[in-house]
Amino acid sequence: MPPFHLVRSLRSCGRAWPPRRTAVALKPRRSCASAAAHGMEDLLRRTVPPLPAYETRDKSPPPPESHGVEFMRFYRALEGEQRPQFLERLAAEYGVDHTGAWKLSRKLLDTQTRDVATVLQAEDRLRYSLTPRYRQLLSHISRVEGGVKFLVDLRAEVIDISASGAGDSAHLRDLNGTLKSLLSEWFSVGLLQLERITWQSPCEILQKISQYEAVHPVRNWTDIKRRVGPYRRCYAFTHASMPGEPLVVLHVALTEHISDNIQSIVREFATLDSQEDVNKINAAIFYSISSTQAGLQGVDLGNYLIKRVVRELQSEFPHMSQFSSLSPIPGFAVWLQGMLGQTQKEGSASELLSEKEWREVEEVTGAVPGGAALDALRRLLASGEWVRSEQLAQVLEPALMRLCAWYLYGEKRRGYALNPVANFHLQNGATMWRLNWHADTSPRGVTNSCGIMVNYRYFLGDTAANSAAYLQNKVITASEQILGLVAQFQQNSKL
C-alpha cells in the first residue's frame, strides 16, 4: 500500500485531470513579426558593445570576435522587410547618446571663460560622446575574416533601402554616413594595390572584370582577351581585406592619336595577336572606368586610379604625352527629349533648331511645319531611326552637337556639371576637349547620347589648377571647339 502522502498527491492529480478548459488557456504564440523583433533586440543587446567611458576608451578590451561573426550570420539570415527593420533598429537605438551629448555641450559652454586646456578637454569629451555606439561594432566586424566585404555590401544595402523608400530616416542616413567614413579610412589610396590585369591573370578575376564592365559590355572571352592584350591595358585597384575583388577597373587603349570613336577600340580585332610597335603608341585613351562595389559609392577611388595609371604608363612609355578619355554622355538624350517637350509646350522650337534646320527636318521627314515636325523629330530621336538616314544625320549634326555642348558645359547642378561623367573628369582637372560625332553608333550609344562622345584631355601640367578652379570657383576649362559650340547654342536660343 502506498504511503498516504503519495495517495493524496495522486488523488489531487486525478481531480485536476482532465483539466477544465477555462483553467488551461495557453499563452498566445508570438506572431512572426513579434518573434523577429524579439530576436533582433536580443541579438543587438548581446553584440553591440556599450561605448566605453571616456577615461577608459583606450584601455577597454575588445568584445569577443564571435560577436561580429554572430552579427554577420544573423543579418545574412534575415529576409525581405526584416533587413530594413533591423538596420533601422540598429541605427535608432544604438547610435549617439543624445542626452549625454547635450549635457556635455552645456559643460563646454560653461568652460569658455576658463583656460585653453580645459576647453580642449571639454571639446574632446563632447567629440567622443558623438560617436555612435554601433561604430565600435562595425570596427570590430572589419577585423573578422570577410568582415570588410560584409560592411561594403551592408552599405550598398543601406543605400538601396534609402533610395527605394523602404527606409529613409535620419538615423539610417547617419548609419550610412558612419559606414562611408569608416570605408573611406580603410580604402585610402595608401592601402590600395594597383594590379594590371592580363590574359594570364586568374580566371576568376577576368570573369569579374567582364561582369563589372558597365560602360561597354564585354561580349565573350575573345572580347576580354583583346581588351587585356596588345595595345590595351587594364588596371584595377585591389585591397588586402578583399582578395580577388577588383574595386575599380580602368580600361586603356594605346593609340597613335587621340581616338574619336569607340568602335575602333572595342570592336576592332586586328590587334588580337599582334606585337606592339612602340613608335605607334603616342596616346593613352581611358575608354572605360567602372566602380565594382556599390557600397564604396562616394569613396574617391577612380581619380586616384587614373593618376596611378598615368605614372605607370609614363614609366613604360617615357615619350608618351597625350592622355585623354573617350567618354559616353549618359543622360543627354533624356535631357534633349525634355527640352523638345518643353519648347513644344511653350511654342519656342526655334530656340533649339534654326528656321533653316527645321525646314530641312520637314523636307527629310515629310512632316508639315510646326508641331508635326517636332513630333516627328522626337519620335526619330527616341527610336534611333535617324541614324540610318545619312541625309537626316547630316541635317541634325550641327544642332545636336551644339545642344550636346551646352548640356555638358552649361547645364549645372549646384553650380557643377549636371552630367556625372563630366563632373568626374572635371573634378580630376581634365579639360573638356572635343565632341565627336558618330563616335558610338551602337544601339546603346545612340539611345543614351545620340551617338556623340567626348574627349576629356588630361594636360598633366594643368590638372591641379583646373581641378582647383572647378571645385572652388565652378569654372570649367574647355577647348575652343567646345566654347564655339556653346556660343552657337547661346546665339540660337538667345540666352
Image (tube, rainbow, N blue to C red):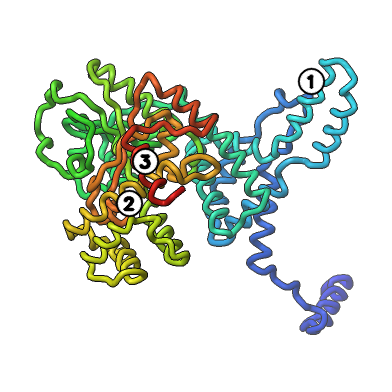
Disc 3, SS: strand
At x 13% / y 21%, what residue is drawn?
Answer: 279
Residue closer to the observer: 25 or 160: 160
Q: Amino acid at mark 3?
A: Ser
Q: Is residue 371 above or below residue 231?
A: below
Q: In this view of the protein, can residue 214 be seen by the observer?
A: no
Q: Is residue 307 left or right of residue 40?
A: left
Q: Is residue 298 above or below residue 41?
A: above
Q: Is residue 169 left or right of residue 374?
A: right
Spatial distance from mark 2 to mark 3, Cα to Cα?
19 Å
Figure quadrant of residue 141: top right
Q: Is residue 179 left or right of residue 395?
A: right
Q: Amino acid at mark 2?
A: Ser
Label located before the other in sequence (1 or 3): 1
Residue closer to the observer: 492 or 249: 492
Figure quadrant of residue 327: top left
Q: Are marks 2 and 1 in contact (CB under 8 Å)?
A: no
Quick one: quadrant of the N terminus? Answer: bottom right
At x 26% / y 32%, what residue is drawn?
Answer: 285
Label located before the other in sequence (2 or 1): 1
- Number of marks present in the image shown: 3
Q: Position of residue 399 (x, y in %)?
A: 31, 52
The circle on residue 221 is none
Residue closer to the observer: 161 or 368: 368
Q: Are marks 2 and 3 in contact (CB under 8 Å)?
A: no
* Residue position marked by numbered label 2 in the rendering: 449
Q: Are marks 1 and 3 in contact (CB under 8 Å)?
A: no
Spatial distance from mark 1 to mark 3, Cα to Cα?
44 Å
Q: Nearer the viewer, mark 2 or mark 1?
A: 2
* Residue position marked by numbered label 3 in the rendering: 290
* Residue position marked by numbered label 1 in the rendering: 120
